[in-house]
Amino acid sequence: MADEALVVIDLQNDFCPGGALAVAGGDEIVPLVNDMIRRTDHVVLTQDWHPAGHSSFASSHPGSQLYSMIEMPYGPQTLWPDHCIQGSLGSDFHSGLAWTKAELVIRKGFRPAIDSYSAFFENDHATPTGLAGYLRERGIDTLTLVGLATDFCVAFSALDAVKQGFRTTVRLDACRGIDLNGSLETALATMRDAGVTLEDHTAG
Ligand code: VGL
Ligand code: ZN
């Protein structure tokens, strides 16, 4: 339908097995995502896109543990391994992803001092990426989200999408999660409570 878009979140090498911040089974979703791309008129991709030395990297905070939380001026921030450095192989889309049909690639996380999980807003929940305006101007009001990782960039994007007034579905069978300290269960409950439609079309 003309008023619908598929938003493919961060289906990049660093989030797939062998990558710097590998999500278990991250590569398994590629064939399904490709089917969905084929069947959807409008496709938008996001690309995690960090400068070297980004403030979300544990390596930028000497003495701090990987995956620990720190307090940033904009709120709590998980510290990640170095990943998705601009222009690196790890920042490329998975080589099997049929990305050429995409009408827009939203890059995020490029400001050194702030992380950006959501496709719509940086982690201060205030600095927009421009995606909501783009979609509205195109007359798109209904979104399906797929990609990586369910409990971080997909969830943050879905929550902002409903807040911005988009009818929003997350296809869980076309997502994989990181699951840090129960983050997957929390993300699913938070999305459900916020009015995100969660669907799993896994056969059987
Ligand atoms: C993501 C952690 C850090 C994601 C991106 O795509 O879910 N997670 N950067
Ligand atoms: Zn990142």
Image (spheres, rainbow, N blue to C red):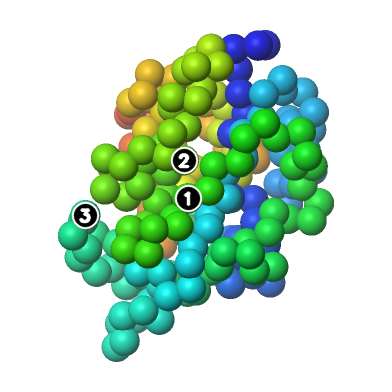
Q: Quadrant of residue 24?
A: bottom right
Residue 119: mark: 2
Type of amino acid under label 2: Ala
Which SS class for mark 2? loop
Residue corresponding to mark 3:
74
Expressed as whole percent of the image width and height from the top left, the position of residue 70 reads: 24, 69
Rendered view: 25 above or below 45: below
All told, the count of numbered labels is 3
User: Quick one: label 2 or label 1, which is nearer the N terminus?
Assistant: 1
State how far apart marks 2 and 3 are (Cα): 17 Å
Residue at figure coordinates x 75%, y 42% from the top left: 99
Type of amino acid under label 3: Tyr
Query: Can you say which quadrant of the picture contains the N terminus?
Result: top right
Expressed as whole percent of the image width and height from the top left, the position of residue 165 reads: 38, 18
Which SS class for mark 1? strand
Q: Are marks 2 and 1 in contact (CB under 8 Å)?
A: yes
State how far apart marks 3 and 1 are (Cα): 16 Å
Residue 108: mark: 1
User: Quick one: label 2 or label 3, which is nearer the N terminus?
Assistant: 3
- Local packing at callout 3 (Cα closer than 10 Å; few below 14, some 14-19, many 20+) is some
Query: Can you say which quadrant of the picture contains the C terminus?
Result: top right
User: Quick one: label 3 or label 1, which is nearer the N terminus?
Assistant: 3
Residue sitting nearer the eye, 146 or 180 = 146
